[in-house]
Image (cartoon, grey):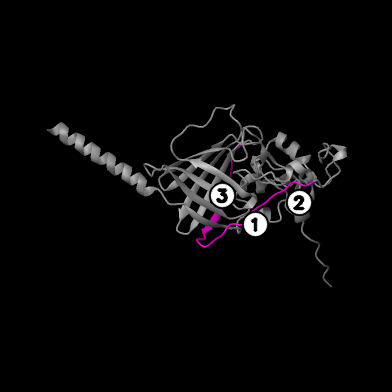
């Protein structure tokens, strides 16, 4: 009898536990409008060439970025390359919807569409494993999600090589991206952690915010490659090592050269203590 009561009690606790987990899950579906107040200078006009401060890059990433030239996007095959998931929230609004198994009505995945460059991906919620390493890599990669309390954790692998930022900082195809979706009322915060064993020395973390926009209509993003440069030359625009004249552009904003080169140390407040004091402007002589 006691064992039967114990089994029933354990079953009830298990049911309550499942109910508690289900209750903790938050409905993320709907229309979301991007809020640009965070990092707006970088997300709007964009960072200048050679402006790598605060990003934990290594020497290889720095060398590759210093050879980058913005006119590389005039090459037809590069004009419609989309942002991957780690850059997807820089611009544009977003829609999230549930994908359900018809017979059981269980949510097996979440669909996501980003307005900028019409990026679309599936976040699998049914516990399926990630593909083997040799599986094809895509711009949006392969994403799986799991609930951690009221937070959705999304892990993405199998990404094509892309950029950490729009000034040529590279991100390799070996990177893993982990996102945390946190909803507080009508505000959705997405924290993104990029771990790249090729081009970074530490995980790189940043956040983006969205506001609920139930009446929103996403715009189309048609992209048609067009020839804009002389293709007879068969060259990819770039700078040879040590020849990029734009790398000190950030110094126009008063940023010291040692900070512009980036690296993990430049992401921490203690780094400011290692910098020389800025020169004070000359004071007019008193009469």
Circle 3 sits on which residue?
A: 113
Horizontal and vertical percent position of residue 205: 58, 44
Q: Nearer the viewer, residue 245 or 71?
A: 71
Circle 1 sits on which residue?
A: 40
Is-magenta flag for residue 224? yes
Q: CA distance from mark 1 to mark 3?
A: 22 Å
In the figure, is residue 144 to the left or right of 279?
Answer: left
Q: Which quadrant is the C terminus positioned in?
A: bottom right
Q: Which residue shows up at 77% across the image and 41% down it?
A: 68
Q: CA distance from mark 3 to mark 2?
A: 34 Å
Circle 2 sits on which residue?
A: 250
Instruction: Check disc 1: other Cα within 10 Å, few if <14, some if 14-19, many if 20+.
Output: few
Magenta range is 202-226
Q: CA distance from mark 1 to mark 2?
A: 16 Å
Of all residues shown, which one is farthest toward the left?
1
Q: Report helix, strand or loop for mark 3.
A: strand
- Counting residues from the start of the chain, the first of labels 3 and 2 encountered is 3
Q: Are marks 1 and 3 in contact (CB under 8 Å)?
A: no
Q: Which quadrant is the N terminus positioned in?
A: top left
In the figure, is residue 219 to the left or right of 242?
Answer: left
- Counting residues from the start of the chain, the first of labels 1 and 2 encountered is 1
- Counting residues from the start of the chain, the first of labels 1 and 3 encountered is 1
Q: Which mark is residue 70?
A: none
Instruction: Check disc 2: other Cα within 10 Å, few if <14, some if 14-19, many if 20+.
Output: many
Q: Nearer the viewer, residue 251 or 122?
A: 122
């Amino acid at each position: 009898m006691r064992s039967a009561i114990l089994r029933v009690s354990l079953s009830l606790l298990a049911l309550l536990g499942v109910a508690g987990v289900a209750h903790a899950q938050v409905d993320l579906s709907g229309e979301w409008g991007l809020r640009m107040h965070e990092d707006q200078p970088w997300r709007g006009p964009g960072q200048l060439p050679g402006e790598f401060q605060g990003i934990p890059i290594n020497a290889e990433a720095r060398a590759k970025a210093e050879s980058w030239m913005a006119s590389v996007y005039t090459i037809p095959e590069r004009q419609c390359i989309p942002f991957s998931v780690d850059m997807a929230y820089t611009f544009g609004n977003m829609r999230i919807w549930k994908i359900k198994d018809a017979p059981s009505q269980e949510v097996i995945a979440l669909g996501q569409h980003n307005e900028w460059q019409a990026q679309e991906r599936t976040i699998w919620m049914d516990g399926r494993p990630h593909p083997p390493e040799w599986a094809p890599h895509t711009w949006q990669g392969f994403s799986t999600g799991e609930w951690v309390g009221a937070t959705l954790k999304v892990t993405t692998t199998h990404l094509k090589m892309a950029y950490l930022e729009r000034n040529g900082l590279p991100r390799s195809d070996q990177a893993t991206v982990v996102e945390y979706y946190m909803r507080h009322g009508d505000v959705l915060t997405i924290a993104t952690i990029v771990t790249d064993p090729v081009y970074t020395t530490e995980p790189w973390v940043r956040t983006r915010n969205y506001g609920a926009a139930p009446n929103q209509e996403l715009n189309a993003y048609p992209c048609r490659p067009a020839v804009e440069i002389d293709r007879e030359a068969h060259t990819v625009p770039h700078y040879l090592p040590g020849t990029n004249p734009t790398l000190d552009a950030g110094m126009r904003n008063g940023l010291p050269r040692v900070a512009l080169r980036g690296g993990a140390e430049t992401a921490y407040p203690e780094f400011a203590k290692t910098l020389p004091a800025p020169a004070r402007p000359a004071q007019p002589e008193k009469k």
